[in-house]
Image: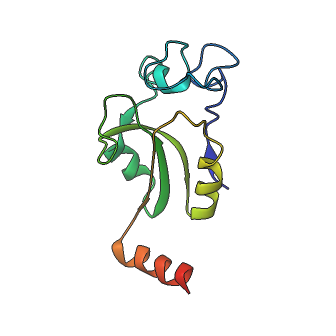
Amino acid sequence: MPVMINLTSAEHGGVQAACGTHDSCGVNCECGCPYTAMEERDNVELIAHVEQRYPEEWLAFVIPPGEDEFAPERGMLVVHSVDDEEVWDAVARITHNQVVHVYYNGKLASYLDWVAQTAG
């Protein structure tokens, strides 16, 4: 079972019950939604530290504003699991305004085995 942090409400990062549900929510909004409030709530950490805790698992991070979206160094872990389908199902529930980084945190050989199994 994946570990999922609810980003669609004030429960995690937002300051209003509707945070993250507005079309205007995003990188530059000021409503306090999870995307903009993750830094203030100290929910961002070095990705390298998270990787040490969850080897051989799929990881999904929400990337804070200003971070490189293609090679982030910091992020907020929102889901992790050994099952990629569980991670992708959880990621599909993240609000539209989040920049999400998903990848397998393991050995290349394990990843290639996964590719072979899913492609077949």
Q: Nearer the viewer, residue 54 or 44?
A: 44
Answer whether residue 83 is visible to the viewer in this image.
no
Please state if 86 lies on the left or on the right of 40 as rendered: right
Image coords of residue 66 (percent x, y):
31, 29
Q: Nearer the viewer, residue 21 or 17?
A: 21
Q: Which residue extends farthest right?
A: 17
**Residue drawn at the location 46% of the way across and 81% of the way down:** 113
- Res 103 quadrant in image: bottom left
Q: Is residue 120 left or right of residue 103?
A: right
Number of marks present in the image shown = 0
- Residue 102 vs residue 24: left or right? left
The picture places residue 3, in percent across and down from the top left corner, at 61, 47
Q: Position of residue 21 (x, y in %)?
A: 66, 26
For the point 59% across and 19% down, the residue is 14
Identify the residue shown where x is 49% and y is 17%.
Answer: 29
In the image shown, does 101 or 29 lie closer to the viewer?
A: 29
Task: Name, please, the residue furthest toward the front.
Answer: 23
Q: Using the image, determine if residue 108 lies above or below residue 77.
A: below
**Does residue 64 lie above or below 104 as drawn?**
above
Q: How is the image coloured?
A: rainbow
- Is the C terminus in the top left, top right, bottom left or bottom right quadrant? bottom right
Relative to 18, is 70 on the left or the right? left
Q: Residue at x 55, y 78 (%)?
A: 118
Quadrant in the picture for the N terminus: bottom right
